[in-house]
Image (tube, grey):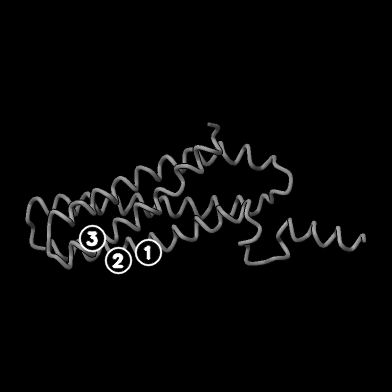
Amino acid sequence: MNEVHFHLAVTHLPIIFTIVGIIVLVTGLISKSEAVKRTAYLIFSIGALTSIAAMTSGEGSEDIVENIDGINESFIETHEEAAELFSILTYILGGLSLIGLWVSFKQITFLKTISIITLLFAFVALFFGIQTGTTGGEIRHTEIRSDPNNATLNNNYREENEND
């Protein structure tokens, strides 16, 4: 397994953990179960750790992928910038979750407030996680790019047909 393969394997985890954490936290808020909310906080914390793995494998992956024919460096840079922001947001979400765990165990009065703040922040992080995933996919998947004129495959196809 090279760095690109490892990056592709772990890069989806922060997004998945954020989605699952949101579902579990909403369930905990509806059921008013501290145990379920604590589970969500742990899920968000694990998601922050997986973000570290995705970020550290990204540089090595970039070194390999940028040498592949047809790869546009601007797509890599866009993805890298999105990933940096998303990682910071997942680290903050993990920190909020640790505070939420502490508040939950200590039964401090702003227990529900920290849950709501964490949930809202998780939605913000998820939004940027989706952006990061999309920009990463656009590096190799020309069919999902918003501008079909930047799609290497479409350009190659057009050039081939113009020569006929």
Query: Mark 3 = which residue?
Result: 25
- Answer with mark 2 or mark 3, whichever residue precedes in sequence: 3
Considering depth in this image, is 87 or 17 the residue closer to the camera? Answer: 17
* Residue 164 image offset from top left, x and y in percent: 92, 61
Q: Tag 3, which secondary structure?
A: helix
- Furthest residue to the right? 164
Against 41, residue 56 (above or below) is: above
Considering depth in this image, is 70 or 86 the residue closer to the camera? Answer: 70
Query: Mark 1 = which residue?
Result: 124
User: Does residue 149 appear left or right of residue 90 in this picture?
Assistant: right
**2 and 1 marks in contact (CB < 8 Å):** yes
* Residue 93 image offset from top left, x and y in percent: 31, 54
Query: Mark 2 = which residue?
Result: 120
Mark 3: which amino acid?
Leu
* Residue 60 image offset from top left, x and y in percent: 56, 36
Q: Tag 1, which secondary structure?
A: helix
